[in-house]
Image (cartoon, rainbow, N blue to C red):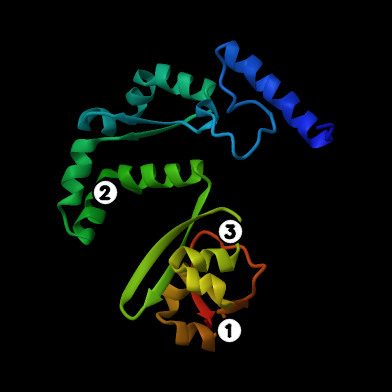
Amino acid sequence: TGEKRIKDELAQLEKALELLNSGLAVRNSDLDLPQDLPLLTAKPILYVANVGEEEWLNQGKLTSKLAPLLHRANSNGARVVILCARLEEELAQLPLDEANLFLEELGVEETGINKLIRASTELLQLVTFYTIKGRETRAWLVPEGTYAPQAAGRIHTDMERGFIRAEVIEWENLVALGSFANARDKGLVRVEGRDYRINDGDVVLFRFNV
């Protein structure tokens, strides 16, 4: 076509093809590939190592035992989450307060499943925001950098179409204050417009009209 954009894109694709023919993945390259080109080797990798309870509690020896996996992950630009599925099953059957106490006794800050969820969302470059309706709280995943109207559209297309504004507060502040009303009294609820990008942990009240 003679367009510079097309020539530049072709050059990037030729370099990608060269990498693939050499048996290398493109995920670790600095290539600027088209967004609509879903190459398998461009996708992020997450390794999950399921270990026994005794191994999981002895993290020092565990790191040595998993050295080959950790090395492979590092060379592939991948992440590793280590968990004990047997222990996760036991924790899932306990009430939340008992499960937290059990983890505290083990000297563990969070469950393996939480680590897995967090690692997955980070690799996929997703953020979580929350909405509250009555006694129901819901979590929504959107790509990093999503604007408020598009986040509203994640809930319902009418909300994006009739978007007016977003009232936003960080979840920690909301939990500490107990309600949106208290947060407003303290001046901690921000009013954001169409150019606001949703942050991880935002609690959002969307105002819209259709």
* Distance in Å between CA atoms under marks 2 and 3: 35 Å
Crowding at dot 1, Cα within 10 Å, few <14 / some 14-19 / many 20+, comes out as few
Contact between labelled residues 3 and 1, with CB atoms less than 8 Å apart: no
Q: What SS does tag 1 mark?
A: loop
State the image coordinates of residue 91 (x, y, percent, origin top left). Answer: 20, 48
Q: Nearer the viewer, mark 1 or mark 3?
A: 3
Instruction: Name the residue nearer the viewer: 52 or 106.
Output: 52
Whether residue 108 appears in this view of the structure is no
Q: According to the image, label 2 marks what residue?
A: 103
* Distance in Å between CA atoms under marks 1 and 2: 36 Å
Q: Nearer the viewer, mark 2 or mark 3?
A: 3
Q: Which mark is residue 160?
A: none
Contact between labelled residues 2 and 1, with CB atoms less than 8 Å apart: no
State the image coordinates of residue 170 (x, y, percent, origin top left). Answer: 51, 69
Crowding at dot 2, Cα within 10 Å, few <14 / some 14-19 / many 20+, comes out as some
Badge 1 or badge 2: first in the primary sequence = 2
Badge 2 or badge 3: first in the primary sequence = 2
Q: Amino acid at mark 1?
A: Gly
Q: According to the image, label 3 marks what residue?
A: 146
Q: Amino acid at mark 2?
A: Leu
Locate residue 175 relative to residue 186 in the image: left or right: left
Q: According to the image, label 1 marks what residue?
A: 187
Locate residue 86 relative to residue 116 in the image: left or right: left
Residue at the spot 61% in from the left edge and 56% down from the top edge? 145
Whether residue 40 appears in this view of the structure is yes
